[in-house]
Amino acid sequence: MLVLTRKVGEEIVIGDNIRVKIVSIKGDRIRVGIEAPSHVQVNRAEIHDRKMVPVGVCEESVNFGAAGTAAEADTSKF
């Protein structure tokens, strides 16, 4: 994992077409703006994890093994 330090207004560029900008910092909250092409899905981790659980399967009933979360698990077998 790459860890970077940024100030308000500074950006991080991923590839040629994704920009992550630090919009504001208030206490322990950081507002991040993300510019990405429309075909790239951008979600908070908890939303992404919910989307990774197959339809009709309760997340609590899925054994993710060592992965621990849906995002880390190989869900191709479901």
Image (cartoon, rainbow, N blue to C red):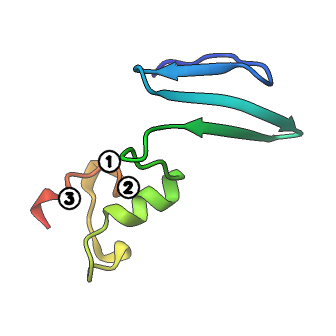
Neighbourhood count class around disc 1 (C-alpha, 10 Å): few under 14, some 14–19, many 20 upward: few
Neighbourhood count class around disc 3 (C-alpha, 10 Å): few under 14, some 14–19, many 20 upward: few
Residue under the image location 28 percent in, 48 percent down: 66
Q: Which residue is mark 2?
A: 69
Quarter of the image that includes the N terminus? top left
Q: Which residue is mark 3?
A: 75
Depth check, front residue: 35 or 24: 35
Q: Residue furthest bottom?
A: 56
- Residue 17: x and y in percent read 44, 26
The answer to which image quadrant residue 59 occupies is bottom left
Tag nearer the camera, 2 or 3: 3
The residues tagged by marks 1 and 3 sit, at their Cα atoms, a distance apart of 9 Å
Residue under the image location 37 percent in, 74 percent down: 60
- Residue 50: x and y in percent read 41, 66
Q: Are marks 2 and 1 in contact (CB under 8 Å)?
A: yes
Secondary structure of the residue carrying tag 3 is helix
What residue type is disc 2 on? Thr
Q: Is residue 13 left or right of residue 30?
A: left
- Residue 69: x and y in percent read 38, 55
Q: Is residue 49 left or right of residue 62?
A: right
What residue type is disc 3 on? Thr
The answer to which image quadrant residue 3 occupies is top right
- What's the mark number on residue 14? none
Q: Which residue is mark 1?
A: 72
